């Protein structure tokens, strides 16, 4: 199964608001390398940077799962974004797995921490915090 990372961030939003923010064209394009997303199960994509993948699961307001193969590699990984209720709003979490080695895992851990922190900043601006 390989190495994986799990990162989450609490957001003061409803599930619908968080879904719209996290699955916007801007967010998804940034996360997978520049791509105009079509969130439909079975949709295959090739991003501007050459990475590619397929949308596996779409549950609006709850979960999106996709395969992602970085450019210039054949090492496919799995990304799952989930939205779950929490006391102060909700948690947006990313599980990204099947890394080939620890250096790839560490790089993606840093990436997802930064990505979800940026998402939290956008959420705070959205609600006027």
Image (cartoon, helix red, strand yellow):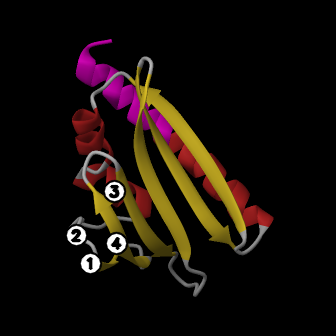
The numbered mark, 1 or 3, whose residue comes first in the sequence reads 3
Q: Mark 2 points at which residue?
A: 40
**Marks 1 and 3: which is nearer the front?**
1
| Numbered range of the magenta stretch | 116-129
Res 28 label: 3
Q: Mark 4 points at which residue?
A: 55
Q: Mark 1 points at which residue?
A: 43
The numbered mark, 2 or 4, whose residue comes first in the sequence reads 2
Res 17 label: none
**Marks 4 and 3: which is nearer the front?**
4
Tag 2–tag 4 contact (CB < 8 Å): yes
- Observer-nearest residue: 48 or 42? 42
Q: Residue at x 26, y 13 (%)?
A: 128
Spatial CA span between label 1 and label 3: 14 Å
91 lies left or right of 128: right
Q: Quadrant of residue 85?
A: top left
């Amino acid at each position: 199964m390989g190495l994986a990372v799990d990162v989450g961030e609490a957001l003061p939003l409803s599930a619908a608001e968080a879904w719209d923010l996290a699955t916007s064209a801007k967010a998804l394009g940034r996360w997978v390398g520049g791509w105009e997303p079509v969130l439909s199960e079975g949709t295959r994509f090739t991003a501007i940077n050459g990475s590619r993948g397929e949308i596996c699961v779409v549950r609006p307001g709850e979960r999106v799962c996709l395969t992602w193969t970085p450019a210039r590699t054949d090492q496919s990984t799995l990304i799952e974004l989930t939205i779950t209720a929490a006391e102060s709003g909700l948690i947006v979490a990313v599980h990204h797995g099947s890394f080939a080695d620890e250096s790839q895992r560490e790089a993606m851990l840093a990436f997802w921490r930064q990505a979800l922190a940026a998402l939290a900043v956008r959420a705070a601006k959205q609600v006027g915090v």
